[in-house]
Image (cartoon, rainbow, N blue to C red):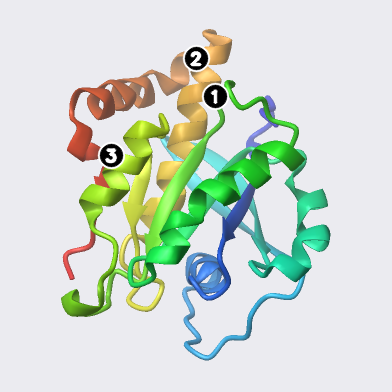
């Protein structure tokens, strides 16, 4: 959805199991609010927020989808036309981490994206604020999965403490920019972001940004 106008509209879909904090991530990013007792999303909800990157403004249209299987027919029609997909799990829930592959495949199927084509997926490990003894997924496991699946952007966040939430959405836009610049090869305004890609590929551990908690 790249345009020559001042604002670029990007459709961002957040996928993941129910209860991993997708709605909390969206609300923390958009309004800087956190509700620990928020209800599961029914169907699909979306909010808009502008983000500025390297002097350019991007309007993110963020779609929060219901993670339960019974809502599959409600959420999948909204995958089409997406520019970015955030695959989300909770670091204290191993099964939600194992399911991100299923979510990726569901998105590829219904968004009509070629599996061997490059698409800006970003993997988000939410709830990084949990005590160490409750953690079920390590940063190394996150990095390893991303490297095995050719995903160069992943990050751990906490919607509760706001750790890395802004950074996650910024990283998503940067990833989109890298792929756009590679496809166009006519936009010198994103050359610096292409350099970041080089940095990621040279250092595997740079794939992930963890919180300091």
Between 98 and 79, which is closer to the camera in this rendering?
Answer: 98
Residue at the spot of label 3: 207
Position of the N terminus, as image quadrant, is: top right
Task: Identify whether 66 is placed above or below 54.
Answer: below
Q: Earlier in the sequence, mark 1 or mark 3?
A: 1
Identify the residue shown where x is 23% and y is 58%. 138
Q: Are marks 1 and 2 in contact (CB under 8 Å)?
A: yes
Most distant residue in the top direction: 185
Mark 3 vs mark 2: give the one in front: 3
Work out whether residue 209 can be spotted: no
Report the side of 27 relative to 83 (left or right): left
Give the image location of residue 67, x and y in percent: 63, 67
Residue 132: mark = none
C-alpha distance separating marks 3 and 2: 19 Å
> Which mark lies nearer to you, 1 or 2?
1
In screen coordinates, is 38 left or right of 113? left
Residue at 35% in and 42% down: 145
**Helix, strand or loop status at disc 3:** helix
Q: CA distance from mark 1 to mark 2?
A: 10 Å
Which residue is drawn at the image coordinates 16% and 65% (left, top)?
A: 212
Secondary structure under tag 2 reads helix
Which quadrant of the view contains residue 204? top left
The location of residue 109, given as percent across then percent down, is 72, 38
Mark 1 and mark 3: Cα distance apart in space: 17 Å
Judging by the rendered image, the residue that carries numbered circle 2 is 182
User: What's the residue at 68%, 75% (across, down)?
Assistant: 41
Identify the mark at residue 118; answer none if there is no mark: 1
Classify 73 as above or below 203. Answer: below
Residue 131: percent from left, percent from top: 21, 80
Q: Eyeballing the image, is 178 above or below 75? A: above
Give the class, few, some or many, for how many residues have Cα within 10 Å of label 1's Cα (few <14, many ≥20): few
- Give the structural element (helix, strand or loop) at label 1: loop
């Amino acid at each position: 959805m790249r345009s020559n106008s001042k604002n670029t509209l990007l459709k961002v879909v957040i996928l993941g199991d129910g209860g991993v904090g997708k709605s909390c991530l969206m609300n923390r990013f958009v309004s800087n609010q956190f509700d620990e007792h928020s209800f599961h999303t029914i169907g699909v909800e979306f909010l808009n927020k502008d983000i500025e990157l390297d002097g350019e403004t991007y309007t993110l249209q963020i779609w929060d989808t219901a993670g339960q299987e019974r809502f599959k027919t409600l959420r999948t029609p909204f995958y089409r036309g997406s520019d970015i997909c955030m695959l989300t799990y909770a670091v204290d829930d191993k099964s939600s981490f194992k399911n991100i592959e299923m979510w990726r495949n569901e998105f590829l199927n219904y968004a009509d994206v070629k599996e061997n084509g490059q698409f800006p997926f970003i993997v988000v490990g939410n709830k990084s604020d949990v005590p160490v003894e409750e953690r079920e997924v390590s940063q190394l496991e996150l990095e390893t999965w991303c490297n095995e699946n050719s995903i160069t952007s992943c990050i751990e966040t906490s919607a509760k403490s706001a750790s890395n939430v802004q950074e996650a959405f910024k990283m998503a836009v940067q990833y989109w920019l890298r792929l756009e610049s590679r496809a166009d090869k006519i936009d010198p305004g994103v050359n610096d972001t292409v350099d970041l890609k080089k940095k990621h590929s040279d250092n595997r551990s740079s794939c992930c940004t963890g919180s300091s908690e």
